[in-house]
Image (cartoon, grey):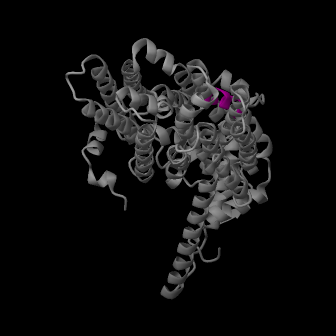
Amino acid sequence: MTGMMESVKARPAKGGSEYRRVEPEEEEELDGAEWARRAEAGSRRRKAAERYVFTCALFASLNAILLGYDVGVMSGAIIYIQKDLHITEFQEEILVGCLSVISLLGSLSGGRTSDAIGRKWTMGLGAIIFQTGAAIMTFAPSFTVLMIGRLLAGVGIGFGAMISAVYIAEISPAAARGTLTSLPEICINLGILLGYVSNYAFSGLSEHISWRVMLGVGILPSVFIGVALFVIPESPRWLMMEKRVPEARAVLLQISESEAEVEERLAEIEEAANIMKSVNSEDKAVWRELLNPSPAVRRMLYAGCGIQLFQQITGIDATVYYSPTIFRDAGIKSDQELLAATVAVGFTKTIFILVAIFLIDKVGRKPLLYVSTIGMTVCLFALGTALTLRKHAEGLISPNLGIDMAIFAVCGNVAFFSIGMGPICWVLSSEIFPIRLRAQASALGQVGGRVGSGLVSMSFLSMARAISVGGMFFVFAAISTVSVVFVYFCVPETKGKTLEQIEIMFEGGKEWKGGGEVELEDTQHLIQGDKKAFSLG
């Protein structure tokens, strides 16, 4: 661009990158009117780039609605599946929990697939597989056929959920990456809410029809995903990995504020690729490097895999999948009242994820994680207490008070989850790994989360029969306490850093408590409602 204070030219540089910033030898004299005109043009371009990036991130996040809808709708549909197909409690646990475990196949395959065919077409493949599974479930005449559809749906969800956050992280500017990579979590919550509403809306139909309609509605979001693929571009970082530099530059021109920024981002991506070559001189396979990691990659894996694991083993899926069971144990009797209570949970979860979106790039990742994990611990303990008192000390609290305490504790748990642990898990998993490992390391990070989710979902009813529903939530509260310690020691603050800067931070082995990071004591101001931290302006 002529007349800019800085210009960028493509020329070979000593470091190996052909893109670098070149300072102008002379500054062009401009009058006030010309400066104003150019400032206005720059502002228009910046806003257009922001809108385009947001649109791409939103479309990429639609995959997450599939996961959320399945989680939400199955909590109510299982009531009618039991009555229609006469399945056992063990079959119920397998049906509910198998999706989390089987989605690992999609996640692990998705990492390699996304490196081979690109990020956005991997999302499309996931949507097609999910559609097939959802259609089979809708028309399933037996438990066996229902399981086949469920397994296919799980593979499709694994493909889409894994790659969406990676794609968004790779197209987002550093200043907005936390907000944009949280969009999948918003869509998961929206999907859960839609699933709950669908349960309530179709609960009046016959037992044979109601659950089929509930599951069949889940096909609709994947249709929108198919349309979105023709709108969003491919990831510029993937294009650079494939040496398709002109296409990468064209995409960056659409999502950047200026040509100078385009060349800077190209230089950063190419530098990361050059570092990859120098570090990996023997051209190790990605999976070999992940299984035999360097100290920096090991720290990344601790943070990325650990946050995924704690997200699930603190019991969020048990709370969502089995919310009707929890509320029945608290004293609610009718099916419609149970489903109405779950709608309240869905609204709470969705509202508080919006709060997190506004705060994640302002307050930072780590303070929100502290608030989230501490709040979840308190609510899980309160829920365990409410359910235990109702069962073993009925005279101490009235039935209505027990029901109110249980609903309040469940809503509080999902609210605190949505403020931190839910969205930040997606953000960290997609931004802490270097470009050479990002897709497959993010997939590996989901292994712990998906296995944890599956084990919790498939064992909840059996364990609850052994130690009571309230006892299970005391266990979750204890695990949540450990997650607070994990956040303190293993999770770095990544707010405001580019993906390449985050990689350098891990390579340098800096202490997470250094570098101006907000500490645990600073979180007290957040809890007390510090106006600066919570300002949305």
Residue 157, located in which quarter of the rendered image? top right
Give the camera-side residue of 156 and 52.
Answer: 156
Q: Quadrant of residue 101?
A: top right
* Residue 297, visible in the rendered structure: no
The reply, left or right, for residue 124 in relation to residue 351 is right
Question: Considering depth in this image, is 322 or 36 the residue closer to the camera?
Answer: 322
Tally of marks = 0
What residue do we see at 24% from left, 44% from top? 528
Residue 199, image x and y in percent? 53, 43
Q: Residue furthest left?
A: 396
Q: Which residues are magenta?
A: 99-106
* Image quarter hosting the C terminus: bottom left
Relative image position of residue 120 (x, y in whole percent)? 72, 49
Q: Is residue 37 magenta?
A: no
Residue 483 shows up from this direction: yes
Does the magenta stretch mainly form a helix, a strand or a loop? helix
x and y percentages locating residue 219 in the rendered image: 68, 47
Which residue appears at 56% of the width and 55% of the height? 173
470 relative to 345, above or below? above
Query: Where is residue 73, by image quadrant?
Result: top right
| Residue 101 sits inside the magenta stretch | yes
Question: Residue at left 56%, top 22%?
Answer: 458
Quadrant position of the N terminus in the picture: bottom right
- Describe residue 234's horizontal placement relative to residue 433 as left or right: right
**Which residue lies at the image location 27% right of the left edge and 40% below the top edge?**
524
Question: Which residue is the extreme one toward the front?
Answer: 206
Q: Position of residue 418 (x, y in %)?
A: 43, 42
Left or right of residue 382, residue 213 in this image? right
